[in-house]
Amino acid sequence: MKLGIRIHKRLPNVTIDVSFTCEAGQILAVVGPSGAGKTTILRAIAGLEQPDDGCVVFNNNPWFDRKRKINVSPQKRKVGYVSQGYGLFPHLSVTKNIAFAASKKEMTGQLMELFKISPLADSRPDQISGGERQRVALAQALATEPNLMLLDEPFSALDYKTKNALRNELVSMKNRLGLPIIMVTHDLDDAIKIADQILPIEHGVFAPGWLPENLHYVAASPYTENDIIMKPNAGSPLPFKLPVSARHYP
Amino acid sequence: METEPLYLSIKLATVGTVFLLCLAIPVSYCLIYHRFRGIFLAESIIGLPLVLPPTVLGFFLLSAMGPASVLGQIWESIFGHPLVFTFYGIVIAAIIQSLPFAVQPIRAAFEKIDQHLVETAYVLGASKLKTFYRVILPNARSGLVAAAILSFAHIMGEFGVILMVGGAIPGETKVASIAIYECVETMQYQNAWQLSFILMVMSYLVLLLFNYLNKAK
């Protein structure tokens, strides 16, 4: 499973122009400051936003192609999307929130067990903590048996302990599910700790300069070559273990 | 005291409110989720009864539903009796006159719904219909209740339009507000007082319920 996107979208304050691929079992982190256009990228992949130009291709199936006038509806893309506000339905209990999306009946119980949220079954989203809401949102997104996962600032507004626990959960989820996972965050630390690839963006475009200097970055040419390889410096203070790359698509 | 006009008023308000909700929900949905060119024209037509004198609206409806009109003739050929000066005629008139009172709160409730919830439902695979029934309607509950209460109260107090379209046929179109007018005209003040008092208490209770539900939100 592989997602490839090339998006051009003009917004009132920024023009987004990015391209990348993400393969199954990988976490790609789109990192950048607020207003860089990160959320719009996720929304375009989910089908909630239509780019002015470009394409979104999953497993060689075009979900969006401006030139060929293809635009698959969000319902048919089968994307697990956890938005910044978690998007849980306030009038439904935790169980019903997950069951709303479940493609199979037994899946609701299994996911609640998996994310350890069974004790919250009858609670409504406003009666549970931020970390619990996040887990419910992940379970809800997975209930559709998605083709890929999109996570918008998944760790914002969480305390340090909950954040760490969820980071670990996400990494184990990545290994278990083998789905492409695209996460946007303004926190580079989150990206470095769990992502396999990092795509730094600022003002809507690839911006390696946004990364700290001590994170050594080797790039042939970000816009003409296909691969951008980023490696940590020897002795880098950052807990950076995996080679991180951001690819251009196609 | 005549109780028939009161019974008729309650019957008219109940039937009218049910039909109004059935009409106002899709109209409000279209106004919010299917924004089209010239939407302000549709909005202005729906809001027209708010500014039009009831006698003017009543006269138009009388002309549009009368035996010589297309609608009146179709009705008569199907049901065998005219549409005007019947209970059905005043139900239609009450629905048209009260439509803005039902549309406004429902529309406001739809507008207040977080669009992220609707988008989440779409991404989770829900169709537009499922999203409407499972996400939009439950989250617009307070607006629906407000619309029902306001419509009921407004139809209960309807006078001009109903008099024009229905006249004052006892047991058929003579609702409480028209009965009070007749009582005053024939100087039956005691009856007028009794009916007016009951209508006032009912209106107060409806408003009380409306405000209570608004506070409880």
Image (cartoon, helix red, strand yellow):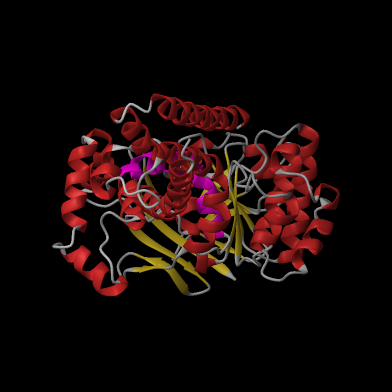
- Main SS category, magenta section: helix
Q: B215 above or below A26? A: above
The picture places residue B100, in percent across and down from the top left corner, at 34, 41
Of the pair B139 and B207, the residue shown nearer to us:
B207
Residue A91 is covered by the magenta coloring: no
Q: A13 above or below A22? A: above
Q: A58 above or below A83? A: below
Which residue is depicted at the point 66% across and 50% down? A195
Count of numbered labels shown in the rendering? 0
Residue situated furthest left in the rendering: B68
The picture places residue A179, in percent across and down from the top left corner, at 65, 65
Q: Quadrant of the C terminus of chain B?
A: top right
Q: Is residue B33 left or right of residue A125?
A: left
Which of the 4 image quadrants contains residue B158? Answer: top left
Q: A239 above or below A3? A: above
The picture places residue A94, in percent across and down from the top left corner, at 74, 50
Of the pair B101 and B40, the residue shown nearer to us:
B101
Q: Is residue B72 left or right of residue B122?
A: left
* Viewer can see residue B2: yes
* Viewer can see residue A220: no
Residues in magenta, as a range: B97-123
The picture places residue A145, in percent across and down from the top left corner, at 66, 67
Residue situated furthest front in the rendering: B187
Q: Is residue A156 left or right of residue B27?
A: right
Q: Is residue A206 left or right of residue B117?
A: left
Of the pair B209 and B115, the residue shown nearer to us:
B209
Which residue is depicted at the point 32% across and 64% down? A66
Which of the 4 image quadrants contains residue A159? Answer: top right
